[in-house]
Amino acid sequence: MIVIGIETSCDETSVGIVRDGIDLLACKTASSMDIHAQYGGVVPELAAREHIQAITPTLEAAFTQANLTWKDIDAISVTYGAGLGGSLLVGVMTARTLAITQHKPLYAVNHVEGHIYANFLTKTGLEGFILPQKQPEFPLLGLIVSGGHSQLVIWRDHFEYTLLGQTHDDAIGEAFDKVAKILGLPYPGGPSIAKQAEAGDPYAYNFPKAKLQAKYDYSYSGVKTAVLRAAQKVIGKDHTFPSFELQHHLSDMQKADIAASFQRIAVETVVDKTIQAFEEFQPRSVVIGGGVAASQELRKQLAERLPVDIEYTDPKLCTDNGAMIATLGFFHIQKGRPAADPYSLDIKPNLSM
Ligand code: KG4
Ligand code: ZN
């Protein structure tokens, strides 16, 4: 069973081809991140326009990489939410058109679930991908950490899961991006904060961790404001000093200390909840998905505090990609879930888990 997956929910146009939900045959991604970098974040209209440009060449590149043609494909899988409306539309309209013209069944999948399914890919003939040794097992504790999502989920089986907790405001990656902006570090914030933090003291500041009613929920708005106030204080200005001016007054060392302290707390926030959930649910596997899974600080803290080893997938499969969508599509088919109507499938920008 060969499934082609189409992903366009944010700023990556990506197509993956996967056999039997385990074997990666192709994964091609075109990112418009460079365009957004100059604005310090994704500009939805620009992302949608770039998807229109990139979708056909990306499809072609994936077929070339897999050395396959449409007659080899059994089904099409597409992200229909959550994500940016204009971006999602390009993927969904493309998938609908292809399902009709190529006579293939169409499966609509949830992007956030998809991040976890990237970890089910354990085989590939492609060079340049380092994959986990074995597929995760249920019960599975999933931590999704990206620019758009921060969720902690327990899966008892495919499609049988409970959302344990999530952020009340910014996603963790978004918090990295916003703090990077305060410090004048380039977008995306995760890697640039990690780099600046190398020279800093992670205990220079004790930024707050939000305390919320719900056991597994968390928040990043408090720590973001605390970073802003700390930056204003360290240069001797009060709260009225504009945040966009701060970067010109902070020394490299001051930036490094703030970056390292923020990174430690931002990561601890999700790791605390992950450890708590691990103790309560005793899962067989712990799986991390999303762009922030690339964070060395996250990996370090999890390794120090979790009693089991985590296998991470290749960074190219941690960020948004079509292969995870194809993999999840395969499990929709395997579990007998209904196909979508290619004449009416609509986007769901606010799709939840
Ligand atoms: O999964 P992703 O590519 O896109 C979304 O679905 O949002 O995640 C992008 C996010 C960005 O916010 C970026 O700052 C963050 O992942 N990120 C990191 C690292 N690499 C990327 N955050 C922390 N540490 C990193 N090394
Ligand atoms: Zn994502």
Image: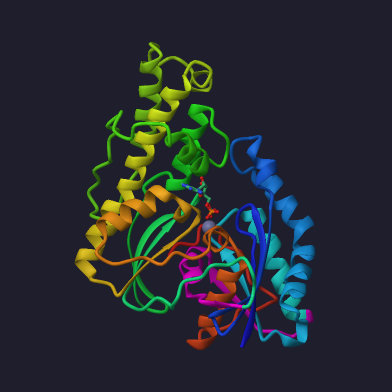
User: In the image, residue 205 lies at what x, y percent?
Assistant: 30, 29
Residues 271 and 225: in front is 271
> Residue 69, position in %: x, y?
78, 82
Tell me, yes or no, whether the highlighted magenta stretch contains residue 117. Answer: yes
- Left or right: 298 as drawn, with respect to 70: left
Instruction: Specify the quadrant that holds the C terminus.
Output: bottom left
From the viewer's perspective, is residue 238 above or below residue 61? Answer: above
Q: Quadrant of residue 80?
A: bottom right
- Quarter holding the N terminus is bottom right
Residue projecting furthest to the top: 236
| Viewer-proximal residue among 249 and 182 | 249
Q: Quadrant of residue 219?
A: top left
* Rendering colour mode: rainbow
The reply to whether the magenta stretch includes residue 114 is yes
Q: Nearer the viewer, residue 338 or 333?
A: 333
- Residue at left offset 75%, top offset 51%: 49
Residue 97 seen in the current view: no
| Place of residue 341 in the rendered image (x, y in percent of width and height, measured from the top left) | 64, 79
Q: Residue at x 20, y 66 (%)?
A: 280
Give, as a single range, the part of the protein colored magenta: 101-124
The percent coordinates of residue 158 (x first, y second) are 41, 79
